[in-house]
Image (cartoon, rainbow, N blue to C red):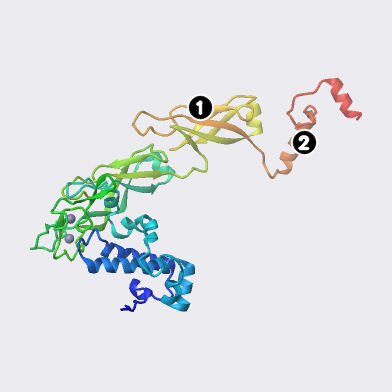
Amino acid sequence: MVLSKRDYYEVLGVERQATDQQIKSAYRKLALKFHPDRNPGDTKAEEAFKEAAQAYAVLADEQKRGLYDRFGHAGVNAAGPGAGGFDPTIFRDFSDIFAGLGDTFGFGDLFGGRRRRGGPQRGSDLRYDLEISFDESAEGTETAIVVPREETCDTCTGTGASPGTTAETCGQCRGTGQLRYQQGFLTVARPCSTCRGTGKTIAKPCATCRGAGRISRARKLTVKIPAGIATGQQMRLTGEGEHGTAGGPPGDLYVVVHVPEHPFFHREEDDLYCELPIHFPTLALGGTVKVPTLKSREELHIPAGTQPGARFRLRGKGMPNVSGRGHGDLHVIARVAVPKKLTREQKHLLEELARTMPVQAEDGSGTEEKPFFERMKDMFT
Ligand SMILES: [Zn+2]
Ligand SMILES: [Zn+2]
């Protein structure tokens, strides 16, 4: 008796133009649904599982798919050993098929075995990246943030069962949440896939959370940012992470602060650095300049003969310490301000000044006067 085979595209429930990704995802769903672990002793499920695996083996292979598209089952049945029948090689990339299932179905931890059955689990920690201005980091601020997070469903109080009904003990694992099977010499325990390791099955799932017991919600929180916080520092909001399961405690929320660079101040620890352009006469003659600080302007005395690059320290005018231990310092680095335009009078005065200045070294290394002999040599070469 020859059984007519179902069309492979029909088996996977995809269009003939389906992409590789669509084929893979359709197969994943079927493999999960009909997996022998979930349907022990069910021969129909086993057949469906094999049929899907066979269809996938052909459609996931570019060459085989091409043959199948042109010649149908005959095209791939004659394609060598294993063709036509159930191809065990498909299981080689089975782990690949199941990798990432957690992302799709929301129970990734189960396959890794991290989440233990039923018992209370602490909710995940969350991270929130918050950008604040430089001024806000200096003064401290209070800001509202909206954090999407998983919370316990209010409708079913997290049971996942429709109100008035209860979850029942899973028949597959008899409520243990684990299935044991033999692998070589080893007995391996794996979370029960029927009940997703919870030990319970839900006949009438809660309509609000579709049986998950949890729901995604955007939660608005007010965050107090202490003065002096630096970029990359984080604050922990205890208990504001995702809700735990089965009565487990919630995770924490970490707010990671980002502060953009200030155009004038550069921060190192609690100290601030800035470069201050000062007119040449002030540097040469000495005088007083005004330095912008975080809160106001401070007067700074410049001694006569100050060189560019000279540093001055204004104590306590830096950033506040985030732990409340005073303030850092402000370091002012002297630069020369060179006017781009000169009035007639300024030009005249500068020319007069220039006439009195010693000849400058050729390499531009400064205004040191060269010895007489050197200057003579320069003049005649
Ligand atoms: Zn619910
Ligand atoms: Zn179970």
Q: Amino acid at mark 1?
A: Arg
Residue sitting farthest toward the right: 380
Q: Position of residue 321 (x, y in %)?
A: 38, 32
- 196, 97: nearer the viewer: 97
Q: Nearer the viewer, mark 2 or mark 1?
A: 1
Q: Where ligand 1 lies, by image quadrant?
A: bottom left
Q: Position of residue 331 (x, y in %)?
A: 51, 30
**Tag of residue 167:** none
- 222, 206: nearer the viewer: 206
Q: In the rendered view, would you say 70 is above or below 192?
A: below
Q: SS class of the residue under badge 1?
A: strand
Q: Classify 10 Å Cα crowding around label 2: few (below 14), some (14-19), many (20 and above).
A: few
Q: Amino acid at mark 2?
A: Glu
Among numbered discs 2 and 1, the one appearing first in the sequence: 1
Q: In the rendered view, would you say 272 is above or below 344?
A: above
Q: Say which quarter of the image contains residue 325.
A: top left
Q: Position of residue 303 (x, y in %)?
A: 59, 24
Residue 96 placement, left or right of 272:
left
- Which quadrant of the figure contains the N terminus? bottom left
Q: Classify 10 Å Cα crowding around label 1: few (below 14), some (14-19), many (20 and above).
A: some
Residue 299 placement, left or right of 94:
right
| Residue position for label 2 | 351
Residue 29 placement, left or right of 294:
left
Q: Say which quarter of the image contains residue 211.
A: bottom left
- 193, 139: nearer the viewer: 193
- The CA distance from mark 2 to mark 1 is 35 Å
Q: Is mark 2 within 8 Å of ligand 1?
A: no
| Residue position for label 1 | 313
Residue located at (38% from left, 61% from top): 90
Q: Position of residue 22 (x, y in %)?
A: 39, 68
